[in-house]
Image: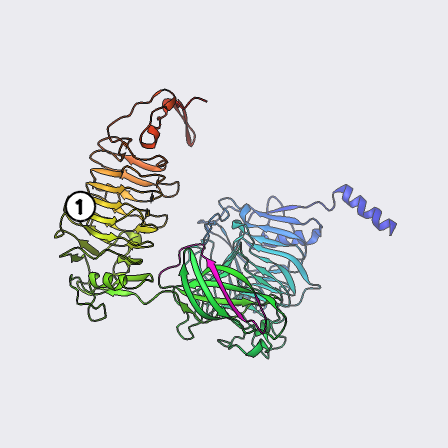
Amino acid sequence: MLRAAILTLLMLLCGATQAAVFVVNTQIDSDDGNCTAGHCSLREAINAANAGLRPLGDTINFSIAPLSGPQIPIDVILGPLPTITGRVTINGYSEPGTSVNTATDLSNAVLRLRLNGGNFGANTPALAVCANNVTIKGLAIASTFGGGIVVGRDNSGAACPSAVTGARIVGNFLGLQANGTSGGSNNQFAVKFVAADGTIGDVALADRNVIAGSGSLIIIEQGATTVVNNVIGADKIGRDASSAAQGILLGAGAANSIIGTADAPNLIKFNARGVATTAAGVAPATGNGNRFNFNHFSSNDQLGIDLNADGVTNNDLNDADNGPNNLQNFPVISSVARIAGGVHVNGSLDVPPSAPAIYQIGVYASVECDAFTNHGEGEMLLGVQAVSLSGSSETFSFDQLSPATIPFGGQITLTATAPNGSTSEFSTCAALDPAPLVVNSVNDVADGQCNAAHCSLREAIIAANSDADTDLISFNISTPASGELLIQLLTPLPQITQPVLIDGGLQPGSFPGLSILRIRVDGLNLPTNAAVIDVCANGTTVRGLSLTSSRTNIDGLRVCAAAVSNVRIAGNFVGLRPDGSIAGNNAGISVSGTATIGGQLDGDANVIGANITGIRLQGSNSQVVGNVIGTNANGSAARGNTTGIFLQSGTANSVIGNATAPNSIRNSLIAGIATTSGASSGNRWIHNRIFDNAGLGIDLGNDGLTLNDVDDADVGANGLQNFPVLSSAERLPGSVRLYGTLDVPAG
């Protein structure tokens, strides 16, 4: 014992256990028995790491000059790569020209190394791991008949000598080529854990795997594995890249696995099933305690979650049946309704007749549900609610706030997770909104009905005003099949008095994200001081329309009163026809209440041109972000307003532009942004592009240049804030250094 301890100490002192770094410098699969600076293949590097048996583990890095192209294929031709038997990190991100993912959605990782594992039999993967604490990252693994990565089996499919722990499979493209978009399927699976534990993906953005292809993308057997923060079934930009039977298969003996967490959900889409287990009666069956309520499921061909590999598993009395995850009953929705910022849910869950226990109810919203079963997928995870239930008290009722706006027409579905961590299948869906009112005619008549035979925009607004719930007005006008669809108003449309979403972008052939609109509503025939669209209801959204009048005394869209709030105006052409030509208004958009004009996303920008005033604000707390003001949609043609944005007296705390969604304000005949002398303070416009205007870019008081005063003591619009005095500027590499002063109040 003493001798062994002394020997261990001597080894430590001599550096025998220090980690080594092996650098792969050739893409050719070769093996001369050495890994040197002159020549080292991946095969030779794995052999060298296996031979070292260093407790601290080795690292395999890459520095390969490719034979051609940005992708570097490593084709395995000499036979299966050696099973990994020593602790090692294989780091594909060490190859020059690579970078880790930084995107919050999907992946912008740049990989170069593509490992093609070849065809050496159904049990031979590209990489086999039989050592603890192995990390594999930064590789694209494709075109391997026996699968991508297996942890817990050797390269012949035989069990490892002991259970494997601590494996990390992170930041890879599995079943894809190195560009992350082209296919390269691994026939059996992308990654498989057998009698092993570890993580597939991790919380950091850099650790996100993109996993696609065929077979079952992830297989877990005889153990507990954590699968988080992955894209499973789509490519790196979100397109369908899967022909897989399952995104994740919880196979024989899988128990207590964690599939998704609150801070690192997986995106599981485009598979036949999202998450599935082995069928009842298959021995050994999938175990219990497998949790998968924190994920986003969509566009899977069958069920998002299938506990028995046989379609919907019906609930049973007192949840007494057995099987994978104890065949946990799913919730039954009684009713759902929109509330401010989320949804209210009423429902029940049939549970065992026992003392009260805490169940986790997952709440999801989707655009649509399974067409055959009406059971959910869960495209948008809204959150998870803890409820106390017992055999004598099985109902629940709660409010669930949403992290994002739930699309109109959305469906709500639920899952239940038992106290032991077993998650159910999805419940049936419940519609959150009434059926849409579909405008199918350009004429401006009202016969009292909005139906499939005839529905004008006027009739749709009348119908929406009669319903206190939020309605959707969509468009499906059949002729002409292309080009502008002109709704020429004969008299003012009814004021909008109940919340509604009017979405011209739903007209076939419209693509607001590409600034392609078809529906034009024109007010040429309206009386003086009217508006083409007049919004007098909180929570109303108007998007995807061209609003014009060719009149200097007609507004395009008006928010009618100070009390009207939470109005959203996005993706419209205001003062411009769908082709971008001029047909202006008095005020393009006039807001007396509170509104968001524009937004952060593609398709949210309003294109506002050829109006007397592009946007007129008279209220508090409005946001004007991401709009194109004074040009056509792509900025190639001037479409100047007389004033781009005008703030009237009483306007306060409005935000005009932000760092991620600045406005472009150009070609105004007077000022880009102007205020009256009585406008209130707190209006911010620091993130915008303001140029090519005939007058000032910003005019406080609408009276030309306001000179600075000592100690900034004057009062008026925005406190007549003094402007900085720039003394000099210096060009630096990648930046500019500015020197100047600002006269501020004393103190």
- Please state the total of marks drawn on the protein image: 1
Q: Is mark 1 on a helix, strand or loop?
A: loop
- The image position of residue 622, as x and y in percent, is 34, 44
- The image position of residue 371, as x and y in percent, is 39, 73
Residue type at mark 1 is Gly
Task: Assess whether residue 392 is covered by the magenta stretch.
Answer: yes
Q: Does 199 appear above or below 641? A: below
The scheme the figure's colours follow is rainbow
Residue at (46%, 52%) from the top-left corner?
Answer: 107
Dot 1 corresponds to which residue? 584
Image quarter for residue 222? bottom right
Q: Residues within 10 Å of mark 1 (few under 14, many from 20)?
A: many
Q: Does 491 appear above or below 678? A: below
Task: Assess whether residue 638 is covered by the magenta stretch.
Answer: no
Residue at (29%, 31%) from the top-left corner?
Answer: 700
Whether residue 182 is visible, yes or no, is no
Q: In this view, does 678 lie to the left or right of 18?
A: left
Whether residue 418 is visible, yes or no, is yes
Q: Is residue 723 left or right of residue 335?
A: left
Of residues 375 and 481, which is closer to you in this image? 375
Of residues 689 and 131, which is closer to you in this image? 689
Q: In this view, does 622 lie to the left or right of 391?
A: left
Q: Give the range drawn in magenta.
A: 388-408
